[in-house]
């Protein structure tokens, strides 16, 4: 019993001495380290949010580019440039196609298209919003009391000739609502790397990618100090807990926990990699991954001296489905078309979502004749779904094929644009037949 009491007293002395040493050696000197860490954490958060915001703006830039770069639009503007059609004919041709092109984009407030000679030839949405922006810029961001808006301007060229431009305004307030989940940090947009001179505030700015603007994050210094005190207290408690746990826990338990953490990190990393390559709605490859794979398949075709075929696909009547049944049903429509294509293509083929209602199917080691046979299987599946009335609307696609001859030096962009142009001809043909 005496030995047990002695061991207990020794344990108490050990804990007390450990607490005192921890306070002297670690707890007191760590204040400045925690201050630096708190500020660094704030800077890292703002840098990360600026990067995320830049990616979102880049996505909107690509959306407008996809409308601006369409071949049939350039062709019609080029005809007008050469004075072969009137301004009124150009407006009639452009308006409906412009509306169809931009209507599917979420958070779009307004959009306009101008000809090379300054005439407005197509419009969409609330036009007064443009008065707030500097339309001489390619990108502009305006922050009001309750809304943050992004303006993107894209020039239209063909054969090096300026034909006009598209300009659009998006509501990006929702992005800030997502990133401002910590009420202690306030975010704003600025065109200068401004520094706050208020000693009670800590400010950090980081440039938003592909813009001339900065994301400004501001936090009250008292918030940092509170976190420092909390961290110091937590560190103190944690240190004491570690001392006690070291006495009680075995090496086996520590190893087991370490393995669990490693496995969890590995799983999380795999999930992040998947999201970077795949479209979140359909689960197939996204635009970036689809084009990267096409470049690789093109090189393989050159090495193996084998043909390669690409098919550009556009879903028919998606806008009508969205307007009639809502965007949730529209997403179901997109998922259905994606699933059918992914199930019916060959094992060597792949399909990627290019954005909105557009897809790209790549057929390696395949000429156009064999690719058409695969497409027939896909179209047969759609006919079967329509015959069984699986959906309250008809499921159909417009498509265009382009064949790559090995070592012909045809660029990937050219291959896709050829298929895109044929797809639009196919779509016009279907419209003329009443589909």
Image: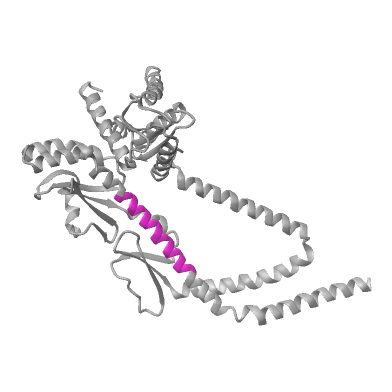
Q: Is residue 176 visible?
A: no
Q: Please state if 7 lies on the left or on the right of 283 as rendered.
A: right
The x and y percentages for residue 390 are 40, 22
Quarter of the image with the C terminus is top left
Please identify the dominant SS of the magenta region: helix
Quadrant of residue 54 in the image?
bottom left
According to the image, what is the colour scheme of the structure?
Answer: one colour
Span highlighted in magenta in the image: 41-61
Looking at this rendering, what residue extends furthest in the top direction? 387
Magenta-drawn stretch contains 279: no
The residue lying at 76 percent from left, 66 percent from top is 246
The x and y percentages for residue 15 are 76, 75
The residue lying at 19 percent from left, 47 percent from top is 156
Q: Is residue 253 visible?
A: yes
* Of the pair 105 and 291, the residue shown nearer to us: 291
Quarter of the image with the N terminus is bottom right
* Of the pair 336 and 389, the residue shown nearer to us: 336
The residue lying at 29 percent from left, 58 percent from top is 146
Number of on-image labels: 0
Magenta-drawn stretch contains 50: yes
Is residue 98 shown above or below 234? above
The x and y percentages for residue 115 are 12, 46
* Of the pair 337 and 174, the residue shown nearer to us: 337
The x and y percentages for residue 399 are 31, 29
Q: Please state if 64 lies on the left or on the right of 234 as rendered.
A: left
């Amino acid at each position: 019993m005496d030995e047990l009491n002695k061991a207990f007293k020794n344990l108490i002395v050990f804990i007390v001495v450990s607490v005192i040493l921890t306070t002297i050696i670690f707890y007191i000197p760590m204040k400045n380290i925690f201050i630096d860490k708190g500020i660094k954490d704030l800077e890292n958060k703002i840098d990360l949010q600026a990067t995320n915001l830049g990616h979102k703006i880049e996505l909107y830039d690509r959306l407008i580019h996809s409308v601006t770069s369409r071949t049939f639009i350039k062709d019609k503007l080029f005809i007008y440039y050469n004075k072969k059609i009137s301004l009124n004919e150009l407006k009639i041709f452009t308006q409906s196609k412009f509306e169809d092109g931009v209507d599917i984009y979420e958070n779009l407030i307004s959009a306009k298209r101008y000809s090379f000679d300054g005439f407005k030839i197509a419009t969409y949405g609330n036009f007064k919003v443009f008065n707030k922006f500097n339309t001489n810029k390619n990108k502009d961001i305006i922050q009001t009391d309750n809304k943050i808006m992004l303006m993107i301007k894209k020039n239209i060229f063909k054969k090096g000739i300026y034909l006009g431009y598209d300009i659009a305004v998006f509501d990006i307030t929702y992005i800030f609502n997502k990133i401002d989940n910590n009420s202690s940090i306030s975010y704003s947009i600025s065109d200068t790397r401004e520094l706050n001179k208020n000693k009670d505030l800590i400010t950090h700015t980081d440039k938003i990618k592909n813009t001339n603007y900065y994301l400004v994050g501001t936090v009250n210094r008292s918030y940092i100090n509170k976190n420092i005190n909390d961290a110091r207290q937590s560190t103190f408690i944690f240190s004491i807990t570690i001392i006690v746990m070291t006495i009680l826990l075995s090496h086996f338990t520590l190893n087991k926990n370490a393995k669990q953490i490693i496995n969890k990190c590995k799983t999380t990393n795999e999930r992040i990699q998947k999201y970077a390559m795949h479209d979140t709605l359909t689960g197939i490859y996204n635009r970036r991954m689809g084009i990267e794979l096409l470049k690789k398949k093109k090189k393989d075709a050159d090495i193996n001296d084998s043909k390669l075929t690409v098919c550009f696909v556009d879903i028919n009547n998606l806008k009508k489905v969205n307007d009639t049944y809502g965007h949730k049903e529209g997403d179901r429509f997109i998922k259905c078309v994606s699933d059918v294509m992914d199930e019916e293509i060959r094992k060597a083929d792949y399909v990627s979502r290019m954005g909105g209602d557009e897809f790209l199917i790549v057929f390696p080691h395949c000429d156009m004749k064999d690719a058409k046979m695969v497409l027939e299987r896909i179209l047969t599946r759609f006919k079967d779904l329509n015959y069984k009335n699986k959906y309250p609307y008809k499921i159909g696609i417009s498509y265009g094929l382009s064949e790559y001859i090995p070592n012909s030096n045809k660029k990937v962009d050219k291959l896709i644009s050829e298929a895109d142009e044929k797809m639009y001809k196919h779509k016009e043909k279907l419209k003329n037949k009443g589909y």
